[in-house]
Image (cartoon, rainbow, N blue to C red):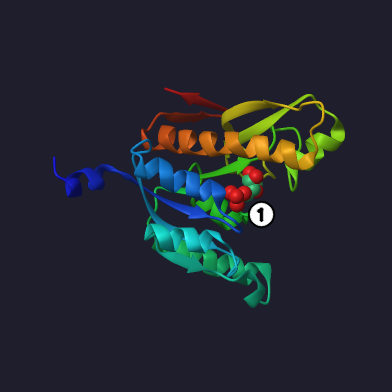
C-alpha cells in the first residue's frame, strides 16, 4: 500500500486550542510517531496569540484563527467558528485546552465527534482550573479525563481517565504539571480509540470494543 492509500484510510482530525498547546503537541507527536492513525487537518484557535499556532506552523498544519475578541457577540463568533468547522470536513474535533464553552449548535451538529481533555477526574471539578479546584478541596487523588462533549459543562460520556496522586508537599503548580504528563498520554490514546472505530456511546457509558 502506498502512502496516499494509507492516508486515505486515516481519520481526519481537527484540534481547537486557546493557549500554549502542549496537548496539541502531544497529538502531533503521537500521529508522527505512528501511534494514532489520523491526519491532523487543521488547528482552530480563538486566540491570535496562542502558542499553539507556532506548533501548528512547525508541523505544517493549517491554522484558522477565529478571534473571539473581534466579534460583537458570542453568537457571531460561534457562527463563524461553526462555518469553518463544517468546511474542514473533519471526522473528529479535539478540544485541547480550548478555553470556551462550545455552543449548542456546534455540539448538536457534531454529536459524538467532539472530545475534550479536562485536568480533573470528572464529574469532580468541572469548569475552569480543575487542578486548582482539586488542590484546594484537599483530595488525595485527582487526574484527567477525556470525554465526549455534550451540552453540559464537562459532563459528556467519559472515554478515558487516569488517576494522579496528590502528594504531600504538592502545590497547585506541581500537581498541574503531574496531571499534564498524564493528559499528554490520555488524549492521544482517546483519539487512537476513536480513529480505530472502537468507541461506542451507550447513554452515559462509552464502551471500548
Ligand atoms: C490543560 O491542562 C487542559 O486540560 C486544560 O487546559 C490546559 C491546556 O494546556 N483544559 P495546553 O494548552 O494543552 O498546554
Query: Which residue is at the front of the view, 173 or 193?
Result: 173
- Please report the residue visible at 60 percent of the width from the left and 29 percent of the height from the top: 161
Q: Is residue 155 visible?
A: no
Query: Is 198 placed left or right of 46 in the picture?
Result: left
Outermost residue toward the left? 1
Query: Is 205 placed left or right of 26 in the picture?
Result: right
Mark 1 surroundings: few (<14), some (14-19) or many (≥20) residues within 10 A: few
Query: Which residue is at the front of the view, 101 or 69?
Result: 69
Residue 209: quadrant of the picture = top left
Query: Is 123 placed left or right of 88 in the picture?
Result: right
- Please report the residue visible at 81 percent of the width from the left and 39 percent of the height from the top: 133
Query: Is 46 placed left or right of 26 in the picture?
Result: right
| Relative to 136, residue 58 above or below | below
- Please report the residue visible at 58 percent of the width from the left and 44 percent of the height from the top: 116
Q: Secondary structure at mark 1?
A: loop
| Relative to 106, residue 205 above or below | above
| Relative to 176, residue 52 above or below | below
Please name the residue that numbered disc 1 is placed on.
Answer: 101
Query: Which residue is at the front of the view, 160 or 205?
Result: 160
- Please report the residue visible at 36 percent of the width from the left and 40 percent of the height from the top: 33
Question: Residue 103 at x, y = what percent?
Answer: 62, 56
Amino acid at each position: 500500500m502506498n502512502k496516499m492509500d494509507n492516508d486515505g484510510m486515516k481519520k481526519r482530525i481537527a484540534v481547537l486550542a486557546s493557549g500554549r498547546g502542549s496537548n496539541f503537541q502531544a497529538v502531533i507527536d503521537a500521529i508522527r510517531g505512528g501511534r494514532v492513525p489520523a491526519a491532523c487537518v487543521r488547528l482552530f484557535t480563538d486566540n491570535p496569540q496562542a502558542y499553539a499556532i507556532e506548533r501548528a506552523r512547525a508541523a505544517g498544519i493549517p491554522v484558522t484563527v477565529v478571534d473571539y475578541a473581534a466579534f460583537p457577540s458570542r453568537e457571531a463568533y460561534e457562527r463563524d467558528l461553526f462555518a469553518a468547522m463544517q468546511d474542514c470536513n473533519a471526522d473528529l474535533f479535539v478540544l485541547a485546552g480550548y478555553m470556551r464553552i462550545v455552543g449548542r449548535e456546534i455540539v448538536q451538529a457534531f454529536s459524538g465527534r467532539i472530545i475534550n481533555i479536562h485536568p480533573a477526574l470528572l464529574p469532580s471539578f468541572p469548569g475552569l482550573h480543575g487542578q486548582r479546584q482539586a488542590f484546594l478541596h484537599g483530595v488525595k487523588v485527582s487526574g484527567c479525563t477525556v470525554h465526549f462533549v455534550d451540552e453540559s459543562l464537562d459532563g459528556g460520556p467519559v472515554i478515558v481517565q487516569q488517576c494522579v496522586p496528590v502528594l504531600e508537599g504538592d502545590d497547585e503548580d506541581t500537581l498541574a504539571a503531574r496531571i499534564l504528563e498524564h493528559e499528554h498520554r490520555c488524549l492521544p490514546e482517546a483519539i487512537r480509540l476513536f480513529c480505530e472505530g472502537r468507541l461506542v456511546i451507550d447513554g452515559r457509558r462509552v464502551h471500548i470494543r
